[in-house]
Image (cartoon, rainbow, N blue to C red):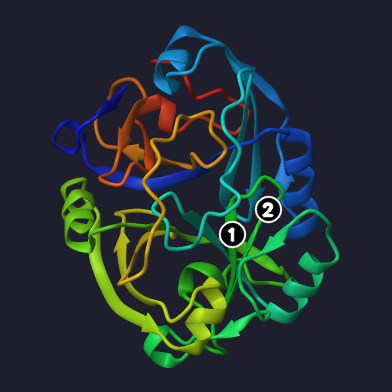
Amino acid sequence: MAVSAGAAPALRKLLRFSLSTANLERLAAFYSEAFGCRSSPVQRVTDAHFRALMAVAGGAQFQRLWLGQSCIELLQFDQSGAPYPPAAAASDLLFQHFAIVVSDMQRAYERLSSVAGWRRISTAGPQQLPARSGGVCAYKFRDPDGHPLELLAFAPGQLPPAWRATADGALCLGIDHSAISVSDSARSIAFYEALGLRLYARSINHGAEQARLDGLAEPQVEVSALGLAEGAAHLELLCYRALARAAPIALRNNDIAATRLVLQSAGAGPARELLDPDGHHLLLLAGAAATKTDNDAAWSES
């Protein structure tokens, strides 16, 4: 059951990105081939706390993938939910991607292009954004299940310190942020600040490069970046102005579009779920559950 922001302890670190999948083996193979992810063994979870937390009958298989120090979790539920809506746009409120930092965009794009099963979002290859939009080179696409992803390359000499230590010869360095589409920037900023995140940058991205990146006509997007107390990964809120959106969808955890941010919270207690104002899923882990290794289920109440 979801809890309110006021009842949740402060969040400290983004631990992993949790994706629902209809085919765990296929999706794990894609992430390995496209980005060089390392994988842990496939495990199964069926306990009562997991079922209550996910609000889904039955159990699930899960596997953790590692990209540098970043963790991606794949969950294949016994009772699969709805597929990712095929017509969903970047401005729709269910949209949520994570951005993979790459050391060489051309090489990363060529590697991705050699792998089957993905679909483009960006309409003309990687886009070099202007300085007002961060000056990065970016490319958006969907994995074989429909989850949106982004390749992200920083300008020469602008690689953030958190990624410099991992850049030694690696092509895909880790996950920089998760970006979610929101309906009201101020409301979502207030929600996440109440959880202990800190707003540290804002911009309005627009222009031809942004249109090609998002696959949208004349987007104007408010970007709000919020950081956590620990770790390199942060959160970005994307509020698209004056664009029609599909009606919001209440996502269940076994629906493919239900991406979960798994976060470490202060204090102790069982894992809990929290929904943000637009229905994006957060899982809060505290105490021992937040420090378990990739070979632990980390879904128990302790």
- Residue at (25, 45) in percent of width and height: 277
Nearest the viewer among 81 and 284 is 81
Residue at (44%, 88%) from the top-left corner?
A: 207
The percent position of residue 60, horizontal first and vertical second, equals 61, 20
Q: Residues within 10 Å of mark 2 (few under 14, many from 20)?
A: some
The residue indicated by pointer 2 is 143
Screen quadrant of the C terminus: top left
Q: Is residue 64 above or below residue 203?
A: above
Residue 301 shown left or right of residue 145 in the figure: left
Q: Is residue 137 visible?
A: no
Amino acid type of the residue that numbered disc 1 sits on in the rendered structure: Leu
- The amino acid beneath tag 2 is Asp
Q: Secondary structure at mark 2?
A: loop
Residue that appears at 73% across and 34% down:
23
Picture layout, residue 256 above or below residue 232: above
Check disc 1 and report the residue beneath it: 149
View extreme (top): residue: 48
